[in-house]
Amino acid sequence: MVAVDSTNLKCTITTNGGDVLVIFTGVVTHSVVNTVINFDVRYDGATLVGAAYAAGLMSVSTANVNTRVPVVVMALIAGLAAGSHTFELMWMTGAATASLLSNTTTVPVTLIAREVS
């Protein structure tokens, strides 16, 4: 897993301690037919799912080359200590190139982290 965009898809919040909901929305494409793109969330330097589950937190498959695929990734991270926490969207693909589209009006590119407890 690598960072999708370690500048624009990374956020830091200060919590009172408890659960944090992380939500990502966007549109992806891939340069190869029927290729899977796997997503995960990294927080405070550790991935949520990590190597224990190769597909990551969520996976999408592209039916055709450069087909636009809307993506929503949601993760509830439970029991974080009070203080500052950094959240980042991660991805991986098995072949060629995945792209995140930044010029779509139907699904904006967002990464939100919010304390929910």
Image (cartoon, rainbow, N blue to C red):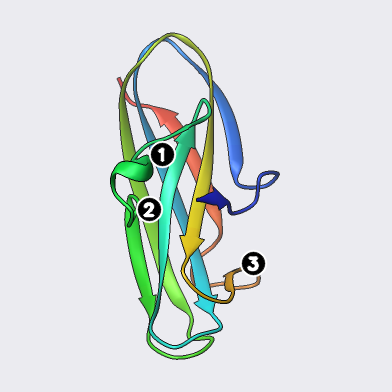
The answer to whether the residue labelled 2 contacts the one labelled 1, judged by CB atoms less than 8 Å apart, is yes
Q: Residue 47 lies in what quarter of the image?
A: top left
Looking at the image, residue 51 lies above or below residue 116 = below
Residue at x-position 48% and y-position 37% = 42
Q: In this view, does 60 lie above or below 14?
A: below
Identify residue type, mark 1: Val
SS assignment at label 3: loop
Give the residue drawn at x 51%, y 25%: 44
Characterize the local packing of mark 2: few (<14), some (14-19) or many (20 or more) Cα atoms within 10 angstroms.
some
User: Where does label 3 land, which residue?
Assistant: 102
- Residue 45, image x and y in percent? 53, 29
CA distance for labels 2 and 1 = 8 Å
Q: In which quarter of the image is the C terminus?
A: top left
Task: Calculate the distance from the C-alpha at mark 3 to the C-alpha at mark 1.
Answer: 19 Å
Determine crowd level at label 3: few under 14, some 14-19, many 20+ residues with C-alpha closer than 10 A.
few
**Nearer-the-camera pick, 96 or 112:** 96
Q: Which of marks 3 and 1 is nearer the N terminus?
A: 1
The disc at residue 38 is none
Can you name the residue that lies furthest to the right here?
A: 7
The span from disc 3 to disc 2 (Cα, nearest Å) is 17 Å
Quadrant hosting residue 18: top left
The x and y percentages for residue 103 are: 65, 72
Q: On the image, numbered disc 2 is attached to which residue?
A: 73
According to the image, label 1 marks what residue? 22
Q: Which amino acid does label 2 sit on?
A: Val
Q: Which residue is drawn at 40% across and 60% down?
A: 38
